[in-house]
Each structure stands twice: as C-alpha cells, then as structure tokens.
Image (tube, rainbow, N blue to C red):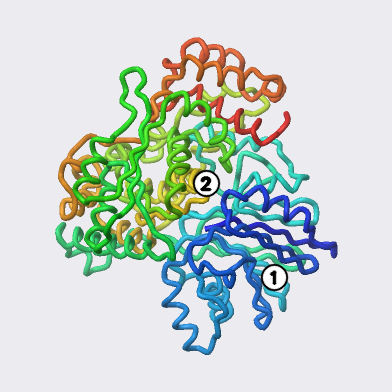
C-alpha cells in the first residue's frame, strides 16, 4: 500500500524530476517508509512506500528490471503473489526480492496484459516497457486503489491522489459541470472518468489503459460481473447458496491476512465486520486487534454502537481498542479530514474513519474492513422497492438521488447548472447495459461498480492512507462478488436485506449483532449542524473566494443557514453540509474562483 506518481512527455521534452518530487511529497502520508524516483528521458516514476510485504529494500519502488526492460510503480497488495511467484519461477524467472511488486512485473513479462486476470488483490500500477515505449496504467476490478490522470500540454501525469496531480502545477481547475451535477444529485458520487475538476480524470476500475509513445490511448475493460446462473446453480437450495457464500467469504478473509506485519479489524459492531472477526477466530487467530469508534450524541441521536462491538470483542477475546471522540476534537480535525480527501465526499463516515485511522495506525499497519457488503448483498432499502419495480430508472433515482434535476436548478447558480439531467442519463445508460435483466440486479451492478467505488471504497482508502494505514476489504474479493451476483435476488433481499449474508453470519457470530436495526457510522453533529459547526460552514460558504466562485444561489444558502435541520436528504444527509463540504474542499486545495 503506497502512493505512486509519474509523467510521460510526447514532444521530445525530458520528464521533470522536480514535478515528480512535488507529487510524491504530497503523498508522503500514504508511504512514510520509503521514497524513490526513476527518471529515464521522457518517462519518470515516483513512489512513496508503506512496508507491508518484504520489508527489505529489495522491494523498494519504483522497481526496475533492466533485463526485461520494464519499470513499475505499484500501489496495493497481491494476495496470491506467492503462488504466482512459484509458477513464474517454474517458467524460468529469477527474482531479486520477496515482494509482490516484482511478481506483477515478471507476470507482465510472461503473459502481457492478460497477467491482470491472474491477480487476486487490490492494485493500481503504472508500467513502462522500454522496448515499445508504451506506458500501461492499470486499476483493480473495484477501483479499491485510486489512479488519477491529467493531460497538461504534451505531458500526461498520473498519481494515486488528485491533490498530488495539482501539486505539479499547470492543471485546469475549473469546475466540471457534469461532475457537479453528479455530486449534487448522487450523494457526492462522481463516476469515472470525471472528477469535480475539468483538468483531472480518473482511470475507471477494471481498466488497462495503453498509452502509445505519441500520446494515443486505448482502454480495455478486463472484468465485468455477470448475473446469469449456470444450469447447476438453478437447482441450488437456499442452504446450498448459504454454504457457497460462507466458503467463498472464508477464502476472501484468509487471503487478506497475507502480510509481513500484523493485521487487525475495524469493528463497527455490525454484521459485516463482526463476521470478519468471527471467521478470523475460526482460522485460529489469537490476540486479534480490533478497533471501534464513537462520538457524542446530538439531538437525541446516539453516536456509537459500542454495545455491539463490545459483544463481539468479548465473544472472541480480541485485543479491543474502543475510541471515543469528543465533539470538540472532531471539529478541530474536520479540516484535516477534508484536506485528506482526493475528491469531496459528503458522508459523515469520513471524519470517523480519519480519526479512527489515526488511532489504529499507532499500533498496527493493516486492517480488514467490512465495506462493500451492502452493495454486493443488497443491504440498502432501495433494493426492496426495485424488486417490485415496473420503472427501475425512476424508482432508483427517487430512492437514491438527493434531489431531482428541477430542484437542482433552484440551488446551483445558472453558470454551473447542467443543461440536461446528467445523473439520470448516466443511470439510464448503465441500466441499459446487457448482463443484468432484473431491476434489482441492474441497481446492484450499478452500485457495486460505480457508487461503491466513488463513495465507500474511496472514503476508506483516503482516510486510512492519510495515516499510512492499509485497509483490506474481503467483501470485494472479486470471486466472492461474482458468486454474490449469481445468488437469487430473493435470497439477498430476504430479512430486510442481506438475507443470504445474515444466514451465513448465523453460522459464525451471535444473533444479537444480526437481528437488530441496520446501523450506520453515526456522526450526529454533522447531520444536525448547529453552534460552532454552523459557524464553520457559514464561514466557508460566505468567504470571498466562495462568493467569487458563486457555485450556489444565495437565497438557497440563506434558507439552509436559517434552519439546517429542515433540509435533510432522503439518505439522511445535510444539504448544508453537502454544499459546504464542496466549497471547503476547493479552498483546502487552494483552488481559486
């Protein structure tokens, strides 16, 4: 787990070491254990390293194999690297390190781009082939590891974070109106390749991009989940499906214990993270480090779920760390959490994950986390409505979108309002793709491959890596997700959602954490904005740079300031926080109007 960056020129100019160093320095928290730069003519790579596998300098990056003529900068973890290494050694490859980075490089030399199909893990990497002059940019199946790009004149830059791209200078920082429409409509989700800035794009998940020496590019999508069941699967009983999911989840959790340092668990007390702890206990893990966080209540809404996380910690005798964050401390560090975002993200979880990661990183470098289970196993309430839908496009947008296109026109300034309903049209196009026929399957595919990538997954990566902490997500093991896609929808929707996963959990963990109302990462103070939080957001939205930028209509902001709690979205979010977060993020990145 690290940060990578680089650039390649297309006009004969030399790549810039100073720009690489600026980008790498911006990502120092992602990789506090090492720094390296490789510059060869028009191509330069930079890397910040977090030592997880092969702690020696033999795996330092960027990694070069001069005999093969390949250079790689890699961020992530390949869980089956030992098996691949043995296979490659059998084909005559000789290794200089014990790490997974060199395995990717040798696999590419042996199998070319099809090597990516063999990788089990989370990854983003840039690989340069000296003989052909081609640059390859690759991202894992779910975009767990980020990769941003920017075309600046005759130079292409890439990095693990958007702020790193900005650090090299010269980027178009004007607002992308389509991305803004997504941000305001789709709970801050901005699907790839767009970002909120016109000059920065992100590589879509499951994509291999080939960059030719003259700058031409081509993309290949190497993985897509399918929802069709085989004839054998059509005959499976609910118990058969339960057992298959349990076996696959066991494998996914076991894979993510691969490390040369200890691995802990972020334990919310919900069924997902509790199940991870229970499965690790089954694997014989002892003294497993677990971590939970809580906040002060606000407006009568509780700010922690310690009663459930305590139950699991006691049941499995974990080395449990319970962290309580006073409201004042949260407010103090809120600007730091916003600065750690590669893109503006409104979910209240961000400050929770940021402060939790700060505490976890004091004692451990790697954790497993339960993100992804709701999207993969149908845990959200809108899936129930879609199961009965005759108009999935309308029903999905009414359940999930923060506001319709017509309302948005009364909130955004005319200069920033998109001409058409960009978010609805994006969903329409995605729902129209082949491979998912039922309405609920269309929604699950969209959420797993788009919403999940640019909300929960990005949130976990940004907030954990701000403290040099690697988070692994077993529910996004691609083989588990492929299996989950084929599980009949009625089994996933049962028991109010995630029915099949709850049945799996009943084989492992206490029923008290299963048969309870669905919980969320509660941060009440950011839902019911008042007192010093109201002053903070008012200051951001009325600052001179905000007024000059003029993103929002003044009368709408005045209504939000007057009564923030009267403007809560369908997904329990604050409209005021959504507007303020975007402006605060832009200001944190130093983006002028």
> Quick check: 10 above or below 295?
below
Residue toward you, 501 or 217: 501
Residue under label 1: 134
Whole-percent x and y of residue 181? Answer: 56, 34
Residue toward you, 183 or 164: 164
Of labels 1 and 2, the one closer to you: 2
Secondary element type, mark 2: loop
Whole-percent x and y of residue 435? Answer: 39, 58
Question: Answer yes or no: do the residues labelled 1 and 2 have beta carbons within 8 Å?
Answer: no
Q: Residue at x 35, y 58 (%)?
A: 481
Q: Is residue 491 visible?
A: no
Whole-percent x and y of residue 366? Answer: 43, 55
Q: Quadrant of residue 36?
A: bottom right
Q: Is residue 143 visible?
A: yes
Secondary element type, mark 1: loop
> Quick check: 242 above or below 304?
below
Q: Is residue 361 left or right of residue 498?
A: right
Whole-percent x and y of residue 422? Answer: 55, 37
Q: Is residue 557 left or right of residue 501?
A: right
> Quick check: 331 above or below 30?
above
The disc label shown at residue 467, or none = 2
Residue toward you, 291 or 570: 291
Circle 2 crowding by C-alpha within 10 Å: few under 14, some 14–19, many from 20: many
Q: CA distance from mark 1 to mark 2?
A: 34 Å
Q: Residue at x 27, y 50 (%)?
A: 318
């Amino acid at each position: 787990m690290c940060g990578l960056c680089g650039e390649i020129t297309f006009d004969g100019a030399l790549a810039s070491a100073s720009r690489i160093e600026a980008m790498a320095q911006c990502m120092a928290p992602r990789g506090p254990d090492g720094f390296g730069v490789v510059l060869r003519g028009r191509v330069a790579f930079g890397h910040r390293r977090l030592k997880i596998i092969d702690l020696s300098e033999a795996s330092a990056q960027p990694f070069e194999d001069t005999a093969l003529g390949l250079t790689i900068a890699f961020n992530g973890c390949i869980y089956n690297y030992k098996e691949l290494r043995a296979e490659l050694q059998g084909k005559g490859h000789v290794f200089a390190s014990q790490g997974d980075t060199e395995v990717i490089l040798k696999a590419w030399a042996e199998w070319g781009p099809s090597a990516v199909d063999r990788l089990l893990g989370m990854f983003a990497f840039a690989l340069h082939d000296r003989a052909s002059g081609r640059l390859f940019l690759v991202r894992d199946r779910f975009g767990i590891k980020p990769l941003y790009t920017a075309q600046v004149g005759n130079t292409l830059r890439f990095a693990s974070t958007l702020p790193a791209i900005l650090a090299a200078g010269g980027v178009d920082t004007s607002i992308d109106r389509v991305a803004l429409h997504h941000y305001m409509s789709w709970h801050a989700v901005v699907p790839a390749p767009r970002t909120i800035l016109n000059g920065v794009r992100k590589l879509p998940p499951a994509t291999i991009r080939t960059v030719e020496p003259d700058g031409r590019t081509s993309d290949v999508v190497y993985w897509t989940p399918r929802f069709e069941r085989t004839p054998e699967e059509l005959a499976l009983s609910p118990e058969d499906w339960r057992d298959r999911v349990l076996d696959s989840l066991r494998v996914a959790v076991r894979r993510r214990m691969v490390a040369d340092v200890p691995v802990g668990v972020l334990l919310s007390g919900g069924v997902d993270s509790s199940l991870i702890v229970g499965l690790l206990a089954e694997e014989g893990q002892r003294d497993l480090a677990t971590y939970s966080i809580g906040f002060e209540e606000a407006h009568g809404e509780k700010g922690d779920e310690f009663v459930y996380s305590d139950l699991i910690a006691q049941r499995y005798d974990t080395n449990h760390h319970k962290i309580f964050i006073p409201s004042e401390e949260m407010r103090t560090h809120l600007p730091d959490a916003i600065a750690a975002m590669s893109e503006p993200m409104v979910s209240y979880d961000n400050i929770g994950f940021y402060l939790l990661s700060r505490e976890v990183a004091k004692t451990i470098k790697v954790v497993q986390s339960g993100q992804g289970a709701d999207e993969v196993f149908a845990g959200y309430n809108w899936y129930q409505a879609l199961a009965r839908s005759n108009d999935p496009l309308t029903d999905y947008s009414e359940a999930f979108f923060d506001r319709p296109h017509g309302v948005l026109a009364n909130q955004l300034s005319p200069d920033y309002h998109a001409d058409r309903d960009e978010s609805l049209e994006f969903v329409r196009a995605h729902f129209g793709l082949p491979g998912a026929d039922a309405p609920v399957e269309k929604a699950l595919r969209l959420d797993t491959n788009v919403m999940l990538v640019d909300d929960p997954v990005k949130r976990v990566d940004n907030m954990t890596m701000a403290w040099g902490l690697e988070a692994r997500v077993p529910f996004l093991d691609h083989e588990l997700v492929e299996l989950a896609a084929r599980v009949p929808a009625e089994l996933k929707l049962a028991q109010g959602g995630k029915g099949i996963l709850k049945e799996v959990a009943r084989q492992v963990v206490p029923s008290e954490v299963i048969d309870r109302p669905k919980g969320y990462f509660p941060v009440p103070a950011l839902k019911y904005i008042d007192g010093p939080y109201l002053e903070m957001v008012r200051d951001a939205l009325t600052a001179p740079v905000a007024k000059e930028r003029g993103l929002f209509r003044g009368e709408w902001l005045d209504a939000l300031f007057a009564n923030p709690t009267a403007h809560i979205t369908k997904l329990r979010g604050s409209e005021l926080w959504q507007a303020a977060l975007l402006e605060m993020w832009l200001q944190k990145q130093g983006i002028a109007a």
